[in-house]
Image (cartoon, grey):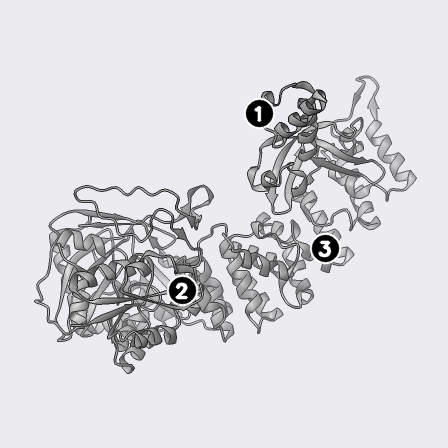
Amino acid sequence: MFKKILIANRGEIALRVIRTCKEMGIQTVAVYSTADAESIHVKFADEAVCIGPAPSSESYLRISNIIAAAEITNADAIHPGYGFLSENAKFSRICEEHNIKFIGASPNMINKMGDKATAKATMIEAGVPCVPGSEGIIESFDHCKKLAKKVGYPVMLKASAGGGGKGMRAVWKEDQLEDAWNSARVESKAAFANDDMYMEKLIEEPRHIEIQIVGDSKGKACHLSERDCSIQRRHQKLTEEVPSPFMTEKLREKMGEAAVKAAEYIKYEGVGTVEFLVDKNRRFYFMEMNTRIQVEHPITEQVIDYDLIREQIMVAAGVKISGKNYMPQLHSIECRINAEDPHHDFRPSPGKITNLHLPGGHGIRIDTHVYSGYTIPPNYDSMIANWFNQKLHTIKSDQEFFISFALVNKKIPRDHPQPTLEQVKNFHLINSEFIIENWTLDQLCRLSLLMNYPMLKLQNLSKLISVADTQEQITIYKSIFYLENASQYTPLVVDGIRTNIIDIFDAIALKNLYPTKYFSEDQWNQMVLKAIFMERPIYQIKDIDLRKNEKLANILFDYARERWAASRHVTPELWRMMRGYLTKDQYLEMKKQVLEIKKEEQKVRVGLKQLEKDPFDFFKGKKINDIITVQVVSSDSKGLMVKPEGCDLEFLIKKSQIAVSAADARPSRFVGGERIDSAVAEINFDKRKVNLSIKLLEELQNKEAVDKFSSPLSGKNLPFSSLSEKLDDKKKKETE
């Protein structure tokens, strides 16, 4: 038996392995990054070694550091847990080379089952049911047609080199097959430079059911019943259940036999999971095999009364298993609790746990490493840290880049980011006007891929846009401004504004600095006109006032005349771009149109009066210190974007003008749609300049309150940060 085991992991699974090792009398070594120095697994292990800084690529994924930690502590085995290096064939091989037992699968087993194509071929050889389909590349459409009849509709066409949903088509009837075949090949060719296709049976109403297996070094295997993992979000399991409510005794027996057959065929050693898709008719098909312990192993332990971590260690030490299969004797459900913000699309929410009360009682089990006072670090979101950090700097070909770009939506949740200060600083180095709040997490990852790919050329980006879905195109157009040699992509962006998809057009035209900097006058005018035709909020076009021009003013004037002739509404925002460029004759003609009155009815023509009115006229009669009620449009690090009630213009209340107290000057305190009062701090009709301030209003109200109340105590309950002090000063002066 092992004397000392190093746990090459962190958090809950590291603590779980330590618990079993202590029960078995085995010493433990914890490894940790600088971000995990206060993690509880570090405190409970017999020894602990720091293996690097917070990024996983420099600590938990750094093989050399982990091997060095094992050697200096004289550990004779390494338990990888799950995630990180648990299914890394290279790590398993290096452990063997250093005479350290890897408590998991051998390099050969990991390689066989790690690649899905290889795994499927292996399982077909083993006689395990796989999804029916082609055994290789489809040679021609005639071959495809014959194969589809043999497999039976519905079928799924898939790109051999695909990923991220590219080159995939569901075909429900024979008459849909040819169109699907042609479009899938075109998409695959454009995305991956490879139009090879294969076919699988489309599984209807699938359930995700997996079988827990154990194999020893002698080639003997057994199963420990199933887990139903069908409830998922973003391809991540949320709850698991044993036994499966969908399961029958006959189906359990068949799936168990298939899982054992798979394990014994590859002479699997250790604890693993064979995952199946089960259709509505209870036909099951091999999906993949996980050559490691899984997050959901506790529910299997609960229903069979067995310690799977102990079994893992025992078979790694050469102990034989009985080969007996175990059936569930009880019922168990596992629920994963994540550090997420439910009010913002369940985005990751790291931070300090101030209070923690764990439930207890008969039948309740809690596996966790958190405790009251523990700070959850932002570095180890399982869905982003491992995959993306590895991909970012290892892409070496166009094909790898296209596949990685497409896979982002599979690997990264579309959440708003929780960036570190260092990340924010890095993005501001790209551009000082970069507002990270305008980007979702998946968009930021794609931006990073685009910026870090050295071989990105115009033709590559053009190809990427041609095969991208709507969300991908939105990200690309938002990102182009920040790319090296951004000016070379102008034809691509100009072509993009011709789209009729509003979200894509908005990504180019609104809150984007690219048109401002790189569009010619004609290109700029074309974009503004398109925004007007599509009824987009042109005030969100960056530098709209700086790029006004006579040509655009004349075009808009002609447009307004056409609208008048048709008795149609003309948006007041047009005046913003015409003012200052109209000739005297044009102005008089417009005024005549606006003031045209039907004498018999004494009514102004509908829709015309609005154009004469300048939105800035809202402030006529207003003066400094006047109170104006505004509605919050948005907030960011710079301040609040607000819109006065009854006015078509938007204004920025700078962060410094939000509150008297710096602690209260947080734009995040306000939400979109909220009504608040502000004061006019500056107004200049010649320069068409207005500044609004909440801070000024607070100061004015403070002064009013000081004048009104004679006692400092009477102002204690008022919501003004410095009122009490002002009242004290007033009282002193009166006494003097």
The residue lying furthest to the right in this view is 584
Quadrant of the rendering where the C terminus is positioned: top right
Q: Tell whether label 1 touches label 3 (CB within 8 Å).
A: no
**Circle 2 residue:** 33
Q: Tell whether label 1 touches label 2 (CB within 8 Å).
A: no
**Circle 3 residue:** 516
Could you say which is closer to the camera, residue 288 or residue 109?
Answer: 109
Residue 164 x %, y %: 43, 62
**Helix, strand or loop for disc 1:** loop
Q: Is residue 726 left or right of residue 314?
A: right
Of tags 2 and 1, the one toward the viewer is 1
The residue lying furthest to the front in this view is 736
Of tags 2 and 3, the one toward the viewer is 2
**Helix, strand or loop for disc 2:** strand
* CA–CA distance in space, label 2 to label 3: 44 Å
Residue type indicated by callout 2: Ser
* CA–CA distance in space, label 3 to label 1: 50 Å
Residue type indicated by callout 1: Lys
Q: Is residue 470 left or right of residue 657?
A: left
Could you say which is closer to the camera, residue 487 or residue 55?
Answer: 55
The mark nearer the N terminus, 3 or 1, is 3
- For the residue carrying disc 2, how many other residues have a C-alpha within 10 Å: few (<14), some (14-19), or many (20+)? many
In the figure, 590 relative to 507: above or below? above
- For the residue carrying disc 1, how many other residues have a C-alpha within 10 Å: few (<14), some (14-19), or many (20+)? some
Mark yes or no: residue 13 visible: yes
